[in-house]
């Protein structure tokens, strides 16, 4: 996969580059500020952009805004946004075009190399990846809502993993049950929440996130 | 049409109240002020007589101050603001003590109150009586009372006509009465206000004492700010020491051990490394909490409006946010305001049982006003909760104020105001994707 990285801290930029290269991805460009990102993306047309939220020159949400702007210029460009902390507000803004190919993760998640590479792959394939912290916040806020209270603890767990954008297989592996059991749980959850069943993973994630009013 | 009628009857009612108020103020000023004046003179005269005045004077001053405070409050109702000028009375200076006597005598406001008593009584008395008598006397004329009395009494006069000689002159009292009634009704509020304006000359703080009070307020708020800051630093130090730092130590130990075991026992080393990764995640999580407590990153990135919107998304109660700030606030104000709103929302979630909350933030004429409303149970007491007092302290550092209205049964409205300037208008398209 061809990757463009935008990260201002040299240590992290090199770490990411090393990690991706070690797993046979090609880092075609690594920029260290917001304004340089768009030209790099236009020039290299990568399979995915991995962008830090906070970048020079403003050290505010430069990276996030550059990512949103880049997706406006290059529709469907997969973008994985990394940050030291997660905000629901930013997740909502990233997902607002409902096009998929978007990820939003804490930087800590990079340490779990396999899961991180899996997230990169899913975003590049047009899926959506949400950080477990964002999902946990969403679920906590809606904990007292009627339909959600009707879910069993296991279904609750599966709903959280669905909202993070995981596939059936990944959910099955995560909570040690068969894929068939997972899809049974999912059908039951969708029925209880009144959501239409869908084979399309991304559409399913969007429906769940919309239900949780991200 | 009926609206106009209602307006007119409202105005008439107000003016009638003004006239009655004038009478009451006149009675009060003439009776209370003159009595208090006499008491002050007596108490002062008794100072050399066995020191009786040393006990008596502070007692009388309590009454005088009560009267003066009443005058200030009455003036406030008429739209004349008079601030309270007294120096704070030192602690452990009970009535009758030498200390109390010294504090009272050395406060210039005591003598300014004293100086006001007599002239205040005369001026408020005369103006108050005028405010009452003019409309009443005018009403008498307008209601044909002099005409009737002319028929009954031998000798009666009214207005400019003394005595009433014949019926035409008697009838001329009606327009006179109408004129006086009109003048009385129009002039009433001005007469009362004139009395209060005179009172203000002596009852308001002098420039020096206003300055002194300001210094006292600033000293208190500065001490509070310094204390709060020190407590904040201690909290941060403890959080870092017990949290992230401790985790990093154990992380280092795990990695060191894994290194040692790498060749002898690869399985155990792998387990230790996994644990180390876990610990690094937890350390980061704790650091994030600490950073959020110091300055939420979203506040630095999006300013007050964006940060409050982001906060609203994470609160268990639905919160409607309405922000109108045409620029960026100074960073210290921004963070104080943010933490105040956060405290309010936390209170709403914890105590109010509200189903809906609203945060309105606007900046207008150098004043940032924040209004937090909820439809909960009400009964919030700004003196009761440490949270609200903390908010008050935070605001005081910026000369800000907070008012709480929270009747039992709700709704609760908290208004916070902070004077501050705006920096350049914002150009970031931060809300473009909202």
Image (cartoon, rainbow, N blue to C red):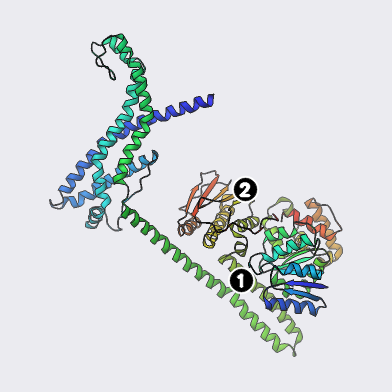
Residue B356, disc? 2
Q: Residues within 10 Å of mark 1 (few under 14, many from 20)?
A: some
Front residue of B46 and A141: B46
Residue B287, disc? 1
User: From this viewpoint, is residue A150 visible?
Assistant: no
Sequence-earlier tag: 2 or 1: 1
Side of B412 where B45 appears, left or right: left
Front residue of B335 and B160: B160
Cα–Cα span, label 2 and label 1: 32 Å
Q: Could you tell me residue B189's position as x and y percent? A: 37, 33
Q: Is residue B341 above or below residue B70?
A: below
Front residue of A79 and B411: A79
Residue B23, disc? none
Total numbered labels placed on residues in the image: 2
**Which residue is situated farthest in the left direction here?**
B49
Q: Is residue B44 above or below residue A178?
A: above
Side of A94 where A24 appears, left or right: right
Q: Secondary structure at mark 1?
A: helix
Q: Residue placed at 72% from the left, 75% from the top? A: A111
Question: Which image quarter holds the N terminus of chain B?
Answer: top right
**Which residue is situated farthest in the bottom direction here?**
B264
Q: Is residue B90 above or below residue B132?
A: below
Q: Secondary structure at mark 2?
A: loop
User: From this viewpoint, is residue A113 visible?
Assistant: yes
């Amino acid at each position: 996969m061809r990757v463009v990285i935008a990260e201002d801290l040299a240590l992290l930029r090199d770490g990411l580059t090393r990690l991706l290269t070690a797993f046979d991805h090609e880092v075609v460009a690594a920029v260290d500020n917001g304004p340089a990102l768009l030209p790099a993306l236009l020039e290299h047309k990568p399979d995915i952009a991995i962008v830090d939220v906070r970048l020079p020159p403003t050290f505010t949400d430069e990276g996030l805004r550059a990512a949103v702007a880049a997706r406006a210029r290059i529709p469907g460009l997969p973008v994985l946004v990394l940050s030291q902390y997660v905000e629901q507000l930013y997740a909502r803004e990233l997902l607002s075009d409902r096009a998929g190919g978007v990820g939003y993760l804490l930087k800590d998640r990079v340490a779990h190399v396999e899961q991180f590479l899996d997230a990169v792959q899913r975003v590049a394939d047009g899926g959506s990846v949400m950080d477990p912290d964002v999902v946990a916040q969403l679920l906590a806020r809606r904990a007292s809502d009627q339909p959600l209270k009707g879910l069993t603890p296991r279904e609750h767990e599966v709903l959280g993993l669905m909202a993070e954008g995981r596939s059936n297989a990944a959910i099955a592996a995560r909570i040690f049950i068969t894929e068939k059991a997972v899809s049974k749980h999912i059908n039951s959850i969708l029925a209880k929440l009144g959501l239409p069943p869908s084979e399309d993973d991304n559409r399913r994630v969007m429906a769940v996130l919309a239900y949780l009013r991200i | 049409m009926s609206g106009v009628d209602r307006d007119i009857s409202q105005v008439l009612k107000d003016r009638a109240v003004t006239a009655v108020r004038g009478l009451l103020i006149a009675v009060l000023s003439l009776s209370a002020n003159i009595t208090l004046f006499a008491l002050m003179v007596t108490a002062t005269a008794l100072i050399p007589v066995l020191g009786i005045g040393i006990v008596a004077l502070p007692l009388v001053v309590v009454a005088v101050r009560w009267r003066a405070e009443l005058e200030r409050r009455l003036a406030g109702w008429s739209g004349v603001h008079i601030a309270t000028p007294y120096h704070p009375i030192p602690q452990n200076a009970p009535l009758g003590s030498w200390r109390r006597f010294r504090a009272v005598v050395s406060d210039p406001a005591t003598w300014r109150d004293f100086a006001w008593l007599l002239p205040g009584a005369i001026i408020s008395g005369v103006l108050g009586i005028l405010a009452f008598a003019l409309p009443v006397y005018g009403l008498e004329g307008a209601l044909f009372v002099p005409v009737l009395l002319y028929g009954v009494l031998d000798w009666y006069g009214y207005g400019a006509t003394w005595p009433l000689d014949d019926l035409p002159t008697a009838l001329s009292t009606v327009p006179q009465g109408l004129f006086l009634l009109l003048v009385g009704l129009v002039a009433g509020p001005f007469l009362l206000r004139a009395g209060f304006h005179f009172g203000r000359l002596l009852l308001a703080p002098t420039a020096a004492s206003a300055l002194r009070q300001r210094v006292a307020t600033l000293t208190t708020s500065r001490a509070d700010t310094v204390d709060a800051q020190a407590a904040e630093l201690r909290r941060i130090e403890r959080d870092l020491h017990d949290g992230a730092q401790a985790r990093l130590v154990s992380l280092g130990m795990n990695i060191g051990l894994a290194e040692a075991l790498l060749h002898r026992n690869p399985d155990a080393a792998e387990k230790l490394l996994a644990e180390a990764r876990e610990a690094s995640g937890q350390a980061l999580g704790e650091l994030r909490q600490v950073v959020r407590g110091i300055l939420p990153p979203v506040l630095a990135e999006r300013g007050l409006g964006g940060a409050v919107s982001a906060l609203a998304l994470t609160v268990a109660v639905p919160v409607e946010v309405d922000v109108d700030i045409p620029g960026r606030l100074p960073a210290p104000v921004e963070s104080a305001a943010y933490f105040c709103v956060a405290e309010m929302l936390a209170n709403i979630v914890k105590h109010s049982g509200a189903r809906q909350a609203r945060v309105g933030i606007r900046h207008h004429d150098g004043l940032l006003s924040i209004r937090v409303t909820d439809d909960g149970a009400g009964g919030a007491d700004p003196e009761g909760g440490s949270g609200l007092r903390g908010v008050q302290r935070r605001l005081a550092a910026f000369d800000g104020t907070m008012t709480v209205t929270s009747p039992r049964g709700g709704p609760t409205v908290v208004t916070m105001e902070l004077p501050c300037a705006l920096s350049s208008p914002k150009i970031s398209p931060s809300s473009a994707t909202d």
